[in-house]
Amino acid sequence: MALKLGSLIKAKYPEIKIIFTRDKDVFVELIERANIANRAKADLFICIHANANANEAAYGTETYVLGLHRTEAQQKVAERENSIIALEDDKGAKYKEIDLSTDAIIVRQLQLKVFLDHSILFAEKLQKAFKKFGRYDRGVKQAGFLVLYKTTMPSVLIETGFLTNPNEEKFLGNITGQVNMADLMFNAFENYRNQIENKTPVIIEKNDEIISEPVESPESTLKDSSGLVFRVQVETWDQRRDNSYNLFKGYEVFEYEQDKMYKYCIGNFSDYQMAKNYKIELIKKGFQNAFLVAFLNGERISIEKAIKLAEK
């Protein structure tokens, strides 16, 4: 299916370089799949999978982008896909330093925010194409897939259907079904490419809008930012934002630059618990990706180190 999609793209857009993680039936380590895309500085990463479920009646297509799973089913899909690490020669020893915890995924989402909106845009176009063809639309979802976590570009993982469903297994195993799915993916890719090339603004609708009233910061907020400081990071962008940016209205915002990204924080606390409580209030007000960061004399340090210093 992936080879068919690549052929369709190459035929229509010969200037586009197609890079496959593999073009024959060989095993490629999960992290290497992401590394191949990163080394090539790819503009889009498309991972094509087939799904499975203990319930043989489960059917339909779904597309994932990086994020926190919202249901146990989404978590199980990610765990199943990530579990092939056990097939690797070192049994996954190289992955010990990779953190797929809730906090780590939130941080990674913020780091890749410039790509995440495009990932969602492409995922939505894929699901729209599948639905129009008559495939059951299971929606655009988020989960902690390792390949999506490690790629630094717009990235999606497509679950084309359920091999545990006899009808879907027949459809996906049939050349006609594979060609149809490749055609649908190509149509979605073409629509996505046209929108990006035309620089049409990417607007992702959200159910939870940012509430305009700012959260009042507690009285003990520090006036001086020297020494040990806890802050709540709320946004990450590839371009600098000024205080007139709508999201920041009513807040005193601290900006710092890291990994060629501009990161924005609210609050200035010496007390970890007060900063943590403030983060909770900001999340309630719509800053869904808010998390704590710490600084020592203006330099970013880990929260773990900051807590130990604060306890001394």
Image (cartoon, helix red, strand yellow):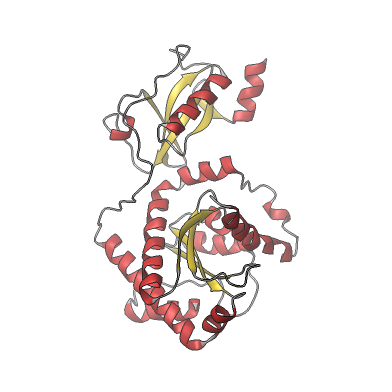
The residue that appears at 47% across and 61% down in the rendered structure is 156
Q: Quadrant of residue 312?
A: top right
Which is nearer the eye, 3 or 143?
A: 143
Answer with left or right where residue 49 lies relative to residue 247.
Answer: right
Task: Please provide percent x and percent y for residue 106.
Answer: 52, 42
Q: Quadrant of residue 22?
A: bottom right
The residue that appears at 42% across and 35% down in the rendered structure is 287
The residue that appears at 75% across and 65% down in the rendered structure is 89
Q: Relative to residue 281, is residue 271 depicted above or below? A: above
Task: Tell me if residue 267 can be seen.
Answer: yes
Residue at the far bottom in the pictured view:
175
Q: Relative to residue 97, is residue 29 depicted above or below? A: below
Task: Please provide percent x and percent y for residue 198.
Answer: 24, 61
Which is nearer the eye, 278 or 258?
A: 278
Q: Relative to residue 213, is residue 126 depicted above or below? A: below
Task: Please provide percent x and percent y for residue 182.
Answer: 43, 78
Task: Please provide percent x and percent y for residue 97.
Answer: 67, 47
Q: Relative to residue 233, is residue 173 depicted above or below? A: below
Total tally of numbered discs in the picture: 0
Task: Tell me if residue 262 can be seen.
Answer: no
